[in-house]
Image (tube, rainbow, N blue to C red):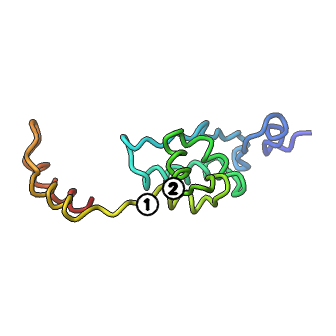
Amino acid sequence: MTTGDGDENLRAGGGSTSRATGTRMSSVRRLEAFDATTSQWPEHHERVLLYFAANDVPEDKRKAVFLTSCGAATYSLPRNLLSPNKPGDATLVVIYAALGAKPKVSEVVATVKFLLRTRLEGEGVSDYVAAPNILVDH
């Protein structure tokens, strides 16, 4: 017996169904590994949370989903920072905090970088003028 609300889809193979349209909604297939060369942790963290929401990942499964899909480099960072404990033993909040932690930058090193900044080949004037502000933030 079909109710018209997509219950047959749920029984047949899983997935969420929109009650308003009766159509099966697709989920995001995989969570991309964090790559520090292309994005920063806060941005990736936002995407992780959106992935969990889009796929209706329950709270008790989020840590396992994240740790199995974060990539080797990302996994090793909290593993090293939380040692002797393993990331699987920590809460997801603690793991996120370890990944988002920034070591304090030496004031001397930051000053030298700021003072030695030169215009790069092909760099526009506006980018060159804006660069010291970026250096100050980091």
Residue hosting label 1: 101
The residue at 43%/52% (across/down) is: 41
Nearer-the-camera pick, 81 or 115: 81
**The N terminus sits in image quarter:** top right
Q: Which mark is residue 81?
A: 2
Upstream in sequence: badge 1 or badge 2:
2
Q: Are marks 1 and 2 in contact (CB under 8 Å)?
A: yes
Amino acid at pointer 2: Leu
In whole angstroms, how far apart are the C-alphas of marks 1 and 2?
10 Å
- Whole-percent x, y for residue 131 in the image: 16, 53
Q: Left or right: where does residue 138 sit relative to residue 80? A: left
Q: Residue extending furthest top?
A: 12
The residue at 62%/56% (across/down) is: 85
- Whole-percent x, y for residue 119 in the image: 8, 45
- Whole-percent x, y for residue 9 in the image: 79, 37
- Whole-percent x, y for residue 106 in the image: 26, 62
Q: Residues within 10 Å of mark 1 (few under 14, many from 20)?
A: few
Q: Please tell me whether residue 48 is drawn above or below residue 23 in the rendered image.
A: below
Q: Nearer the viewer, mark 1 or mark 2?
A: 2
Amino acid at pointer 1: Ala
The residue at 20%/57% (across/down) is: 135
